[in-house]
Image: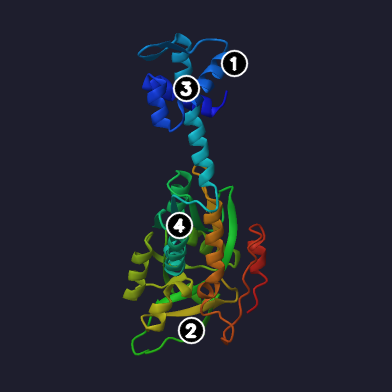
Amino acid sequence: MNVRDLEYFISVAECGSFSRASVQLGRPQPVLSRHIRELETELRVPLLYRNGRGVVMTQAGERLKQLGATIIRQIQEAQNQIRHLSPDHLDSAAIGMPASVSAILLPPLARALRDAHADAELRFLDGCNGDLLNSLNAGSLNVALLYDAPGLAHPNLEAVLSQPLYLIEACPAGLETSDINATIEAAELARIPLVLPGKRHGLRQIVTTWANRNALDLTVQCECDSYSSMLQVVSSGMAATLLPAASLKREILSGYFRCRLITKPALYRTIALAASQSRPVNAGLVTQIKKMIETVRDDFLWPQLPGNTQPNIRAIPASSLNGALQAAEEIVL
C-alpha cells in the first residue's frame, strides 16, 4: 500500500463510481480498478461493494478512508515543512534588527531578497535588543541580528560583524563640517551627559560592561528605548550618545551630528545572527543575510576605511563569540 493507492481509493469512494473518479483523476478506469483490487488483496478485506449504480464503502473501506486522508495530510505537511528549508524556496520571512543596523543593511538586503524570491512575503522589524530577543523566542521572527551583549542567552548565536562605537553629539553651532577623523579618549566621557537605552537592552549592557571593566564613571542623564527618540535628545543638545558612526553617515556628513571615535580604550559592539528555535528557518535566507553583511562591510565600518588617517580598528573574527571581549584588548589604536 502506498500514497497513490490511498489517493485512488479515496477518490473512488468520494465519487461513488470508478467512471467519475477516472474523470476526476485523469486516469483510465481499468487502472483504478486494478489498484483497488490489489489493495483489497493486500489487506485481505473488501473495501467497496460494487453495484449497478456505482460503489459503496464497506465498514473497512470507511475506516481506511479516514486513516488514508490523515496520512495524506501528514505527508503533505511534512513536504511543505521540508520545502521551507530548501535554500531555493522562500514563502515568507520575518527578520529583526536594531535600527542602527537596518539603516545600513535593510535597503540592499530587501532588494536582494526580492530579486531572489519575488513572491515571498517579507517583514522587517526594527527594535532594541531585548524586544528583538523576545520576538525571536516567541516565534514572531525567523531570524534576528542582535548585539552580542553580556548575558545574552540564545543557543543559535553566530557573530557576523564587529563595529567601533563613536560619541555622537549635536554639531556645535558655527561648525560647518564635521571632522570624521576626530577622536575622544574614554576618560573624557565622564564629563559628558549621555542618553542610552534602558538597562535591559544590548547597547546599554555593552557600554556598562566596558565602562566597569575600565573603571569609568559614565553619566546617563536619560534613557530612551527608541532609536529615534534617542537621536531627538541628541539633536536637542541635551545629551550625547554612543553609536556606530556608520548608521548616521548622512547626518554626520550634512553637519547635523558630529562623531568622535572613542579611544584608550576603544569601545565596540559585535553583531550576532540568531535563528528561531520555534519557526522553520530557511538555510538560504541565513546565507543571503551573511553574504549581504559581507558585501556592505565597508559601509558598516565607515569612516574606518582604507586610506583614512584615523586609527585602524581591526574587526573581530566572526568565528568566535567567546573570545570577543578578549579580542577587544587587541584593538590597535
Residue highlighted by disc 4 = 117
Q: Label 3 to label 2, Cα distance in Å?
A: 74 Å
Q: Label 2 to label 1, Cα distance in Å?
A: 80 Å
- The amino acid sitting under disc 2 is Ile
Can residue 152 be seen from the camera position used here? no
Near mark 3 (Cα within 10 A), the count class, few <14, some 14-19 or many ≥20, is: many
**Residue 92 place in picture, x, y as percent:** 43, 50
Nearer to us of marks 2 and 1 is 1
Closer-to-camera residue (1/269) = 1
In this picture, residue 170 sits left or right of residue 208: left
Residue highlighted by disc 1 = 42
Residue highlighted by disc 3 = 9
Q: Are marks 2 and 1 in contact (CB under 8 Å)?
A: no
Q: Mark 3 or mark 1, which is nearer the start of the sequence? A: 3
Which residue lies at the image location 33% right of the left edge and 86% below the top edge?
Answer: 173
The residue tagged with tag 1: helix, strand or loop?
helix
